[in-house]
C-alpha cells in the first residue's frame, strides 16, 4: 500500500494547484508546475461538473486539473507521482488548445480492478487469495470489494493471468456470468471461494492470478474533448478507472513516450481498466510514438467513428439522429461543416454523402442536423449516418503492445493509419480493421489506407486462436458496390505464429502482402471473404488459401 500524505499536506498541494490553474485562466501564467514527489489526491475538496465521456459512464465528475478552455499552457510534472483515491478524473481538457502535459506518473491507491491468486479449483468454483492491496469481505454470500472510497458488489468480468508470463493465460476466456449469478464463501482473511457460471473453456490453474473488474468506467486518466494540438510527453499511467487517454472529436493529438504499464516493482499484472488509448471521431493527425501499452484490460489503441441512426425527418433536409450506445450519449460527433456519410446498414454500402449545415444536441440521446441535400423520398429504414471527413492521418510508430486482455490496434475510421516498427504480443488480434455494427457499440468507419510495416508479431492470437490481422466489415456489399475498406498493405514484417490463422479479409478493395517473414505454426492461413481483390501478394512460403 502506498503511504499517503497527511491531510494538511494534501490540502496544501490542492490549493497550490488550484491557484496555478487560476493564474493561467487570468493570463498571469503559462505553466502549471507540479512539485516533484508523491501526491495523494482525494475527491473531497475537488470541484465537479457533469461530463459526457465517450465509451465511459457519464455523470458528475470530480476533477483534479480542469484545463477547459485554456490555450498555450504547459503542465510540468517534474517526475511527480499522482496517487488518486476514488472517483477522480486526473486531467480534463475541453475546448483546449496547444496544451503540453509532461513528465509525471498516474496511479490509484485502491485500483478499480482486484487481483487474486488461485489456490483451488472446484466444480464451478475458484478459491482466491486477495492480498491487502485488494481488500474484500463476504456479506450475504456476496463478494464485496472495499477500500478507501470503494464499496462494490459488482463483478463485471474475471480473467486468468499466467503467473510466469504475467499475461493472460493460454486459452483464458472472459467470464461474464457474474452479471447473472455468483456466490461467495469466506475461507479466511482475504481468502474466498467464489462460485459462478465460468466459461466452460477455461482451464484454471492453481498458482495463476485472476483479475476481476468490479467497477464501472468512471475515471479515465486523461480526457480530451473538442480540443486541438494536445501533446503528452513522458507520462506513465499505471492505472485508471477507465481508459488511459480518451480523445473525442479532437484534432492533432501527439502522444510521445506515454507508457501505460503495470506498476513497477509490484505484483500487478494489470494496468488500466479498459483501453490504453481511445480516439472517437478525431481529425487532423494523431501520432503515437515510442509508447508502451501493457496489461490494459482491453485494447491498446482503438480509433473509430460512430454510426448514428436517423429516426425522423423533422423538415426538409433536417434529420433527428439517435446515438446508439448509452456510453456515447452526450457526445456530439456530427457538427456544422462536417461531411456526413449515409450507409445501408444491411450491407454497409455507401449510399451518398452530404455536408452538415447545422447540428446541435437535441438532448443527450439525439443530434438534430440539417444537411446540404437529401434524396427525394428518402427512406430511413436500415440507414446509418456517420462523420465522413477524410482529413485524418494516424501514425503509430516504435511502440510496444503486449500482455493485455484483448487486441493491439483497432482502426475503424475514415482516413489513413500507418503502423510502423511496432512490437505486438497480444492474446487476440494484433491489428483489426473493422466495420462491424454489432447491435451494441456501432463503432465503425471505412478505412482508406492502412499500412503495417516493419513490425514483429509474437504469437499473437494465442489465447483464442483469432487471426493475427483481421480486416472485415461482416457485411456482404450490394452488387456493384465498392469494397468497404479501400487499401491494406502488410509488408516487411516478422510473424512468429502461435497458430495457423494469419490473415482474415473481407470487403477490401486492394490488398498487398509481401516481403514478410513467417515462423512458427504452418501452414499459414489466408482466409478471404466476399468482395476482396488481392493486389500484390507474394513471397509467402507455405501460405494456403481457404
Image: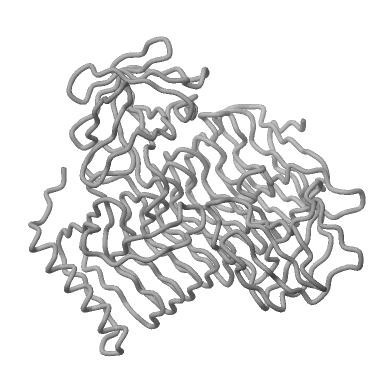
Tell me which corner region of the image, top left, top right, bottom left or bottom right, holds residue 482: bottom right
Percent coordinates x, y for residue 59 in the rendering: 42, 57
Where 319 falls versus 126 (above or below)? below
Q: Quadrant of the C terminus?
A: top right
Left or right: residue 8 versus residue 103 is: left
- Colour logic: one colour
Percent coordinates x, y for residue 14 in the rendering: 18, 68
Residue plotted at (54% across, 62% down): 330
Q: Depth check: give the residue in front, 409 or 363.
A: 363
Tell me which corner region of the image, top left, top right, bottom left or bottom right, holds residue 289: bottom left
Percent coordinates x, y for residue 112 in the rendering: 33, 43
Q: Depth check: give the residue in front, 106 or 136.
A: 136
Where 500 falls versus 457 (above or below)? above
Left or right: residue 360 versus residue 278 is: right
Q: Depth check: give the residue in front, 511 or 219.
A: 219
Residue plotted at (50% across, 65% down): 287
Amino acid at each position: 500500500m502506498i503511504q499517503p500524505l497527511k491531510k494538511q499536506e494534501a490540502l496544501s498541494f490542492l490549493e497550490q494547484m488550484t491557484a496555478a490553474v487560476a493564474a493561467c485562466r487570468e493570463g498571469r501564467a503559462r505553466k502549471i508546475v507540479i512539485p516533484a514527489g508523491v501526491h495523494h489526491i482525494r475527491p473531497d475538496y475537488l470541484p465537479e461538473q457533469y461530463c459526457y465521456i465517450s465509451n465511459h459512464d457519464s455523470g458528475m465528475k470530480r476533477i483534479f486539473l480542469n484545463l477547459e478552455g485554456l490555450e498555450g499552457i504547459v503542465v510540468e510534472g517534474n517526475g511527480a507521482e499522482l496517487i488518486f483515491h476514488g472517483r477522480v478524473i486526473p486531467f480534463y481538457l475541453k475546448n483546449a488548445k496547444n496544451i503540453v502535459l509532461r513528465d509525471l506518473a498516474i496511479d490509484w491507491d485502491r485500483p478499480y480492478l482486484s487481483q487474486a491468486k488461485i489456490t483451488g479449483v472446484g466444480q464451478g468454483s475458484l478459491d482466491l487469495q486477495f492480498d491487502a492491496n485488494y481488500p474484500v469481505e463476504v456479506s450475504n454470500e456476496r463478494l464485496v470489494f472495499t477500500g478507501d472510497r470503494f464499496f462494490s458488489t459488482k463483478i463485471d468480468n474475471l480473467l486468468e493471468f499466467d503467473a510466469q508470463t504475467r499475461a493472460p493465460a493460454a486459452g483464458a476466456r472472459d467470464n461474464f456470468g457474474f452479471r447473472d449469478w455468483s456466490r461467495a464463501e469466506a475461507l479466511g482473511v482475504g481468502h474466498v471461494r467464489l462460485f459462478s457460471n465460468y466459461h466452460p473453456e477455461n482451464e484454471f490453474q492453481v498458482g495463476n492470478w485472476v483479475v476481476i473488474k468490479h467497477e464501472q468506467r468512471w475515471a479515465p486518466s486523461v480526457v480530451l474533448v473538442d480540443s486541438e494540438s494536445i501533446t503528452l510527453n513522458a507520462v506513465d499511467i499505471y492505472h485508471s478507472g477507465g481508459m488511459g487517454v480518451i480523445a473525442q472529436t479532437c484534432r492533432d493529438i501527439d502522444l510521445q513516450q506515454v507508457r501505460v504499464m503495470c506498476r513497477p516493482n509490484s505484483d500487478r499484472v494489470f494496468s488500466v481498466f479498459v483501453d490504453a488509448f481511445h480516439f472517437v471521431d478525431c481529425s487532423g493527425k494523431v501520432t503515437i510514438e515510442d509508447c508502451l501499452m501493457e496489461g490494459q484490460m482491453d485494447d491498446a489503441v482503438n480509433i473509430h467513428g460512430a454510426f448514428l441512426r436517423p429516426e425522423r425527418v423533422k423538415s426538409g433536409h433536417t434529420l433527428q439522429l439517435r446515438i446508439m450506445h448509452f456510453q456515447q450519449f452526450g457526445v456530439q460527433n456530427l457538427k456544422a461543416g462536417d461531411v456526413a456519410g449515409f450507409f445501408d446498414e444491411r450491407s454497409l454500402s455507401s449510399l451518398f454523402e452530404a455536408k452538415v449545415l447545422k447540428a446541435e444536441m437535441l438532448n443527450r440521446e439525439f443530434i438534430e442536423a440539417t444537411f446540404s441535400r437529401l434524396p427525394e423520398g428518402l427512406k430511413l429504414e436500415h440507414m446509418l449516418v456517420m462523420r465522413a471527413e477524410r482529413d485524418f492521418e494516424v501514425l503509430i510508430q516504435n511502440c510496444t503492445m503486449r500482455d493485455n486482455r484483448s487486441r493491439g490496434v483497432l482502426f475503424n475510421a475514415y482516413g489513413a493509419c500507418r503502423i510502423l516498427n511496432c512490437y505486438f504480443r497480444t492474446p487476440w488480434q494484433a491489428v483489426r480493421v473493422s466495420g462491424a455494427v454489432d447491435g451494441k457499440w456501432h463503432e465503425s468507419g471505412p478505412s482508406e489506407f492502412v499500412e503495417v510495416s516493419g513490425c514483429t508479431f509474437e504469437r499473437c492470437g494465442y489465447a483464442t486462436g483469432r487471426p493475427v490481422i483481421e480486416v472485415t466489415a461482416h457485411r456482404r456489399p450490394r452488387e456493384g458496390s465498392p469494397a468497404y475498406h479501400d487499401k491494406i498493405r502488410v509488408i516487411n514484417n516478422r510473424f512468429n505464429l502461435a497458430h495457423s490463422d494469419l490473415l482474415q479479409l473481407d470487403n477490401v478493395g486492394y490488398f498487398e502482402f509481401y516481403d514478410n517473414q513467417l515462423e512458427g505454426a504452418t501452414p499459414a492461413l489466408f482466409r478471404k471473404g466476399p468482395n476482396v481483390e488481392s493486389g500484390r501478394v507474394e513471397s509467402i512460403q507455405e501460405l494456403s488459401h481457404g
